[in-house]
Image (tube, rainbow, N blue to C red):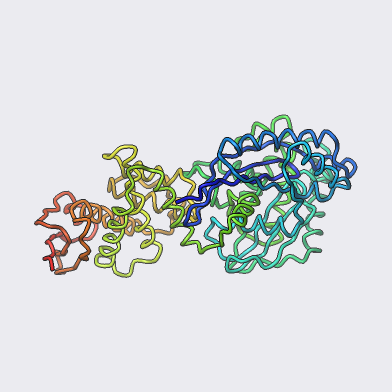
């Protein structure tokens, strides 16, 4: 069961303020219950003189009152609030915090650069299938980078390369002039090299988080047809970043806010932000980065709730169970029986199936009944839609597309998978058909077997034209509906026989 009392985490950032209200399941899945965001632009005060103004205090106090209302409405019993680069760099940062605390009653902790990088790493990497690489978080005032291996942070860097900071310092023209762009890029290169960042190794990936990077990804995704609506796990190539950079650099500010995918309040800072990201990827010689929908706030929540950083497989399983548990039609016992039968049938019919296909089948068998909450007879299509739209963690977009494709093909064996083709180009379509048919057969068996039956499926005979399966069902079952499809997929007739009881 989830922990009973939700936690609110408030982030007073250099560009914006945010709150999330979360609850942690007993399997370690972080459920977002509510959130809110507002523009603060604190770094602009520093760029103008190094001090946070009374107007900045007023904006922050107003934001915190709103955030506290959101937290209270969502049932949060505890509030954790942190402030980042703009506040810790301000010459009057202590006075600013004192005034905000007095006006709101919220205790605010100013975190240093190392803590900011650590929390961003914990939050961003937790829900992604990555083991080693560099985490990049572009905020309004600073750039946080963490080097990690085996899902553990090794070292972090905090650099004064935030999107608003570099925009205000280098880009005064609208649109920016070539010389301004060159000076900004040169400054980023010099700063990165002076910091001594490591080169990306062949077994390492780049993970990107923060509002700037997510906005870049949204702009890139909006310019194409893409089958998955969620941003978490989106693969953004270096070429894609360059395309977004070319587009926003050449668009005047008055038209920039209309770019699909771009938040209006980032229109004035996105040029500096995307140039920082592009230069970082160039310097790292990274082909792409994986975008995380989580970051600093989620990292703080995980640590406040004493959640360890689990394996990606454990994250996927916890996330899937948390999703399925939201639906009244889902029964954990039935899901386990179906998944167990599916695994047995896969071993018999597709010996040597890879780990990815085995796990995909297990997940498909587990989540299937969630589709019944919408409509029993179209449960396959609805289950696939749920998978595509849900906040699943630990899954790459490739794995989400594969899971949806298997469920869809199980429901309708001739349904087109063309919408997922770009994400499934490395998968043999015949493997999808085989796994989908195994899922169908496991579902048919589970609906007929006793809940107390623990007997296993058996391969009773294998001939050139026929496969005879022994199944834990109480009577002779003519698998007519499955038979024709079985011949098409496996090239043999299917004969089913009940296994004798003990």
At a point 46% along the width and 62% down the height, the residue shown is 313
Q: Which residue is at the far top?
A: 254
Q: Is residue 387 above or below residue 60?
A: below
- Name the spot of residue 468 as percent of width and height, x first: 14, 64
Q: Is residue 157 left or right of residue 446?
A: right
- Quadrant assignment for the C terminus: bottom left
Identify the image quadrant of residue 112.
Answer: bottom right
Q: Nearer the viewer, residue 272 or 502?
A: 502
Q: Position of residue 29 (x, y in %)?
A: 50, 53
In the image, residue 182 lies at what x, y percent? 80, 50
In this picture, residue 493 sits left or right of residue 92 = left
Is residue 488 in view from this perspective?
no
Q: Residue 45: x and y, percent?
A: 84, 40
Instruction: Give the left or right position of residue 291, taking residue 175 as reference.
Output: left
Q: Residue at x 49, y 58 (%)?
A: 315
How many circles with numbers are drawn on the protein?
A: 0
Q: Residue at x 54, y 46 (%)?
A: 5
In the figure, 156 relative to 183: above or below?
below
């Amino acid at each position: 069961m989830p922990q009973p009392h939700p936690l609110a985490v408030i982030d007073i950032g250099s560009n914006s303020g945010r709150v999330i209200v979360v609850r942690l399941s007993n399997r370690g899945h972080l459920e977002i219950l509510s959130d809110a965001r507002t523009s603060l632009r604190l770094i602009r005060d520093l760029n103008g003189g190094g001090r946070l103004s009374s107007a900045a205090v007023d904006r922050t106090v107003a934001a915190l009152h709103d955030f506290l209302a959101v937290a209270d409405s969502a049932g949060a019993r505890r509030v954790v609030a942190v402030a980042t680069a703009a506040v810790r760099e301000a010459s009057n940062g202590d006075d600013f915090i004192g005034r905000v605390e007095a006006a709101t009653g919220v205790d605010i902790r100013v975190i240093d650069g190392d803590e900011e990088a650590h929390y961003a790493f914990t939050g961003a990497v937790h829900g992604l299938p990555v083991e080693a690489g560099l985490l990049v978080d572009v905020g309004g005032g600073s750039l946080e980078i963490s080097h990690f291996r085996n899902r553990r942070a090794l070292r972090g860097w905090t650099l004064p390369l935030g999107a608003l900071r570099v925009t205000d310092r280098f880009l005064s023209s609208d649109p920016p002039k070539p010389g301004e762009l060159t000076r900004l890029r040169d400054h980023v290169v010099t700063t990165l090299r002076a910091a001594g960042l490591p080169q990306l190794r062949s077994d390492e990936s780049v993970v990107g988080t923060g509002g700037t990077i997510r906005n870049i990804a949204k702009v890139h995704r909006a310019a194409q047809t893409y089958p998955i609506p969620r941003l978490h796990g989106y693969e953004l190539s270096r070429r894609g970043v360059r395309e977004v950079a070319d587009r926003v650099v050449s668009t005047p500010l008055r038209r920039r806010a209309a770019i699909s995918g771009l938040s209006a309040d980032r229109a004035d800072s996105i040029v500096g932000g995307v140039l920082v990201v592009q230069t970082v990827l160039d310097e790292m010689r990274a082909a792409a980065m994986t975008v995380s929908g989580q970051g600093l706030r989620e990292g703080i929540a995980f640590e406040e709730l004493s959640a360890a950083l689990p394996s990606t497989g454990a994250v996927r399983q916890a996330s899937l169970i948390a999703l399925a548990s939201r639906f009244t039609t889902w029964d954990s016992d039935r899901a386990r029986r179906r998944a167990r039968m599916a695994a047995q049938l896969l071993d018999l019919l597709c010996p040597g199936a890879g780990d990815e296909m085995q796990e995909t089948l297990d997940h498909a068998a587990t989540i299937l009944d969630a589709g019944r909450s919408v409509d029993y007879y179209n449960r396959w299509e609805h289950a696939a839609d749920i998978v595509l739209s849900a906040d699943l963690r630990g899954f790459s977009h490739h794995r989400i597309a594969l899971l949806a494709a298997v469920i869809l093909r199980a429901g309708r064996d001739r349904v087109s998978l063309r919408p997922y083709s770009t994400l499934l180009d490395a998968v043999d379509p015949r493997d999808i058909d085989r796994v989908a048919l195994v899922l169908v057969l496991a579902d048919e068996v589970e609906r007929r077997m006793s809940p107390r039956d623990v007997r296993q499926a058996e391969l009773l005979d294998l001939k050139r034209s026929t496969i005879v399966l022994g199944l834990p069902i109480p009577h002779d079952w003519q698998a007519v509906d499955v038979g024709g499809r079985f011949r098409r997929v496996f090239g043999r007739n299917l004969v089913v026989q009940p296994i004798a009881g003990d």
